[in-house]
Image (cartoon, grey):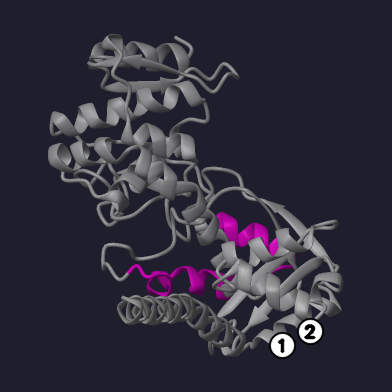
Amino acid sequence: MIRKWKERMRRLMFALVRMGLLVVVVLAIPVGYVAYDYMQFENRLVLEHDEVQDLTIPEDTSWRAVAAQVELEGIVDSALYFDIWGRRVGLDQQVRAGSYLLEGPLGLEEFADMLRQGGAAEETIVTLREGLTKYHVADRLADAGLVDRERFLEVTRSPERYGWDDEEIEALEGYLFPDTYRFSEDMSETVIADRLVRRWREMTDPLFDEYSDEVAVLKEEYDLDLHDIIIMASLIERETGVDDERPVIARVFYNRLDRGMRLQTDPTCVYGSDTYNQRPTPELCRDEYNRYSTYVIEGLPPGPIANPSVESLRAAMSPSDDEEVQDYLYFVSRRDGTGRHYFSSNYEDHRRAINRYLRGQ
């Protein structure tokens, strides 16, 4: 009996030892992986060759907020690793506020040195309002002394840089998000364009997700993709700055498409490098060589004619479904200082509105 009892105890102890070793091994696997991943993080480039990124750190930003920001902007892969590494090398106490222009190839140590030295102190604030064309944007940036106008326009003709390889997207028109920006004077034309496009993505990605069902309906009914919707939004933006009118004007445009009518929207007549500052005229609108004029072409123009607001994008995806506007086909400016329009369902009413509001008859 004693011999059997001793044998059972020996087996139990052996089993417990084996289980203990197993636990150690199981725990060691993830710990080892994390350690390896962290070592990879330390040796990884922050920016690859030819990559360019700008970073602005406001005054009184906490270290953890800095770590979160550089991860959010895609400069590092992990805020946690950057936080740990930064504390280990003392960077958490040494970061200085400012605007930074980061150019690859750039390693972690070089990035840290830049943060210790501080960013550019001189910044220029530029407001790019809704409805500006890329030509207007180039003018404003050049007037602020931030870009060479022609070089900036050349950058806007390279949408493939941002992953848009579709031949339908000829330029960045429509993708330069209207907002107020702070630019340092040493930023290149490419970095500034990057900032505008990145802001566009930040603002529109959630919007497109929110209206995914409506986008699917527009695809089925009108064969419109997202680029077409941006074109539609740019037409709406150029026609009105009154928020509650945007869905109504969108409905007018879709009603005209439904009936096979040309859109006949005046701002399309003056889209181009030579005409963007001109007022529409019958000659410009009827120019058979003007590939943007919706008085000449059928359907939408070949690209956006401006950079639209979120409100116009929302209207393009969700036109008004109010019963009273379902038959609207025309609108004319009231020219009473309100920016509002008079809407009509038939040409006779529209003609009378033109006489009243435009001719004072």
Residue positioned most to the front: 1
Which residue was labeled with disc 1?
A: 109
- Dividing the picture into quadrants, the one containing residue 350 is top left
Which quadrant, please, contains the N terminus?
bottom left
Is 300 within the magenta?
no
Tag 2: amino acid? Asp
In this view, the residue in front, 141 or 46, is: 46
Taking the image as shown, residue 66 lies to the left or right of residue 350, namely right
What's drawn in magenta, residue-wise? 135-164
Taking the image as shown, residue 189 lies to the left or right of residue 2, namely right
On screen, 17 above or below 145? Answer: below
| Picture residue at 77% right of the left edge, 63% below the top | 63
| Picture residue at 54% right of the left edge, 23% below the top | 339
In the rendered structure, are the residues bearing label 1 and label 2 in contact, judged by CB atoms less than 8 Å apart? Answer: yes
Q: Position of residue 121 (x, y in %)?
A: 86, 68
Is 138 within the magenta?
yes
Which residue was labeled with disc 2?
A: 113
On screen, 240 above or below 87? Answer: above
Which quadrant, please, contains the C terminus?
top left
Taking the image as shown, residue 62 lies to the left or right of residue 30, namely right
Taking the image as shown, residue 38 lies to the left or right of residue 290, namely right
